[in-house]
Image: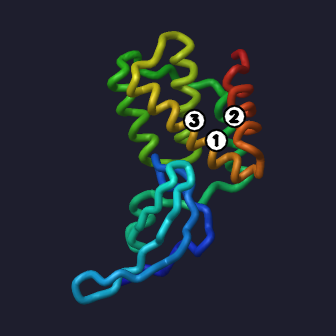
């Protein structure tokens, strides 16, 4: 019934829409008549500790941080051409929110790219601006870990790619 532990103590993981965290420990908690293993994950960005059942971690989208190669591909995606996004901000917001929940680095990069360019055309509504800021922060955090660079360096890399003229 119990799946094997996918992650290890001290491993950095990404919790979609929450950010990068570190597995501090794996504990057993009693529930009814059985003991359930939980990951205890510390999210530095919000200074929050969360507990996630080991059996539910993958289902919740928790994943290891991406490789150096995947981080570079996500950065490269920022300067690629893309399909125009809907002008209806509610539809656009829902679409991007779904991508954020999926939580892959490529999905996050595509949110950053599309909303950055949209904001150059017209100011983003508040909810969409918050979504953009969250996606940007998630991307900065994960790419900085994968490339072993400071968040400031990664932020500069992101914006230099976004501002490439097509």
Residue at the far bottom: name it. Answer: 33
Judge from the rendering whether residue 114 lies leftward or rightward of residue 33; answer left or right. right
| Label located before the other in sequence (2 or 1) | 1
| Label located before the other in sequence (2 or 3) | 3
Nearest to the observer: residue 95 or residue 14: 14
Point out residue 57 in the picture as x, y percentages from the top left corner. 43, 66
Q: Which residue is mark 2?
A: 155
Q: Name above or below for residue 148 compared with residue 38.
A: above
Mark 2 Cα shell of 10 Å, populated few (<14), some (14-19), many (≥20): some
CB atoms at circles 1 and 3 under 8 Å apart? yes
Which quarter of the figure is the C terminus placed in? top right
CB atoms at circles 2 and 1 under 8 Å apart? yes
Q: Which residue is mark 1?
A: 140
Q: CA distance from mark 2 to mark 3?
A: 9 Å
Checking the image for residue 136, the label placed there is 3
Q: Could you say whether the residue bearing mark 1 is in a helix, strand or loop?
A: helix
The residue depicted at 42 percent of the width and 26 percent of the height is 128
Q: Could you say whether the residue bearing mark 3 is in a helix, strand or loop?
A: helix
- Colouring used for the render: rainbow
Q: CA distance from mark 2 to mark 1?
A: 6 Å
Residue at the far top: name it. Answer: 121
Nearest to the observer: residue 109 or residue 48: 48
Q: Name above or below for residue 65 compared with residue 10.
A: above
Determine which quarter of the picture holds residue 79: top right
The residue depicted at 70 percent of the width and 42 percent of the height is 151
Determine which quarter of the picture holds residue 11: bottom right
Q: CA distance from mark 1 to mark 3?
A: 6 Å
Mark 3 Cα shell of 10 Å, populated few (<14), some (14-19), many (≥20): many
The residue depicted at 40 percent of the width and 83 percent of the height is 28
Q: Could you say whether the residue bearing mark 2 is in a helix, strand or loop?
A: helix
The residue depicted at 64 percent of the width and 41 percent of the height is 140
């Amino acid at each position: 019934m119990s799946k094997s532990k996918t992650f290890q103590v001290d491993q950095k993981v990404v919790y979609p829409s929450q950010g990068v965290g570190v597995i501090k420990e794996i504990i057993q908690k009693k529930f009814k008549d059985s003991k359930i293993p939980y990951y205890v994950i510390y999210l530095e960005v919000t200074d929050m500790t969360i507990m996630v059942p080991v059996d539910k971690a993958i289902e919740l989208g928790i994943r290891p941080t991406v490789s150096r190669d995947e981080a570079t591909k996500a950065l490269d995606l920022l300067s690629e051409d893309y399909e125009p996004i809907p002008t209806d901000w509610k539809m656009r917001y829902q679409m991007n929110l779904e991508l954020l929940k999926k939580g892959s680095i490529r999905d996050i990069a595509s949110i950053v790219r599309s909303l950055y360019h949209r904001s150059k055309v017209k100011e983003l509504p508040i909810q969409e601006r918050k979504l953009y800021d969250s996606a940007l922060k998630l991307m900065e955090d994960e790419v900085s870990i994968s490339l072993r660079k400071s968040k400031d360096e990664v932020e500069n890399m992101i914006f230099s790619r976004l501002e490439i003229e097509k």
